[in-house]
Amino acid sequence: MLEALICPRTQTTLRYDAQAQELISKSAGLAYPIRNGIPVMLVDEARTLD
């Protein structure tokens, strides 16, 4: 299922970080959280990558 998700900002693929429970978009510099097993694909909810 995760393979079907793309970054809402850049329309690029995401990398799953199992330890942090996040989907990472390197091109956007954002990490989208996964809460209770559900990806939160909102730019406003994403964490900016360092």
Image: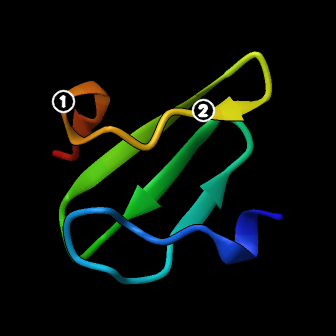
Q: Quadrant of residue 34?
A: top right
Q: In the picture provided, is 23 more to the left or to the right than 1? A: left
> Tag 1: Cα neighbours inside 10 Å, few (<14), some, or many (≥20)?
few
Q: Earlier in the sequence, mark 1 or mark 2?
A: 2
Element type where label 2 sits in the image: loop
Q: In the picture provided, is 27 more to the left or to the right than 38? A: left
Residue 42, position as x, y percentages in the image: 32, 38
Q: Which residue is mark 1?
A: 44
Residue 3, position as x, y percentages in the image: 73, 76
If the image is split into quadrants, where does the C terminus sit?
Answer: top left
**Count of marks placed on residues:** 2
Which mark is drawn over residue 20? Answer: 2
Type of amino acid under label 1: Asp
* Residue that protrudes farthest toward the bottom in the picture: 12
Task: Kindly identify the residue that appears in the image at 44 percent across and 57 percent down.
Answer: 24
In-front residue for pair 2/21:
2
User: What colour scheme does the image use?
Assistant: rainbow
Marks 1 and 2 sit apart, C-alpha to C-alpha, by 18 Å
Q: Quadrant of residue 21?
A: top right
Tell me whether circle 1 and circle 2 mark residues in contact (CB < 8 Å).
Answer: no
Task: Kindly identify the residue that appears in the image at 48 percent across and 72 percent down.
Answer: 6
Element type where label 1 sits in the image: helix
Q: Quadrant of residue 10?
A: bottom left
Task: Kindly identify the residue that appears in the image at 42 percent across and 41 percent down.
Answer: 32
Q: Is residue 6 above or below residue 23?
A: below
Type of amino acid under label 2: Ala
Residue 13, position as x, y percentages in the image: 49, 81
Which mark is drawn over residue 22? Answer: none
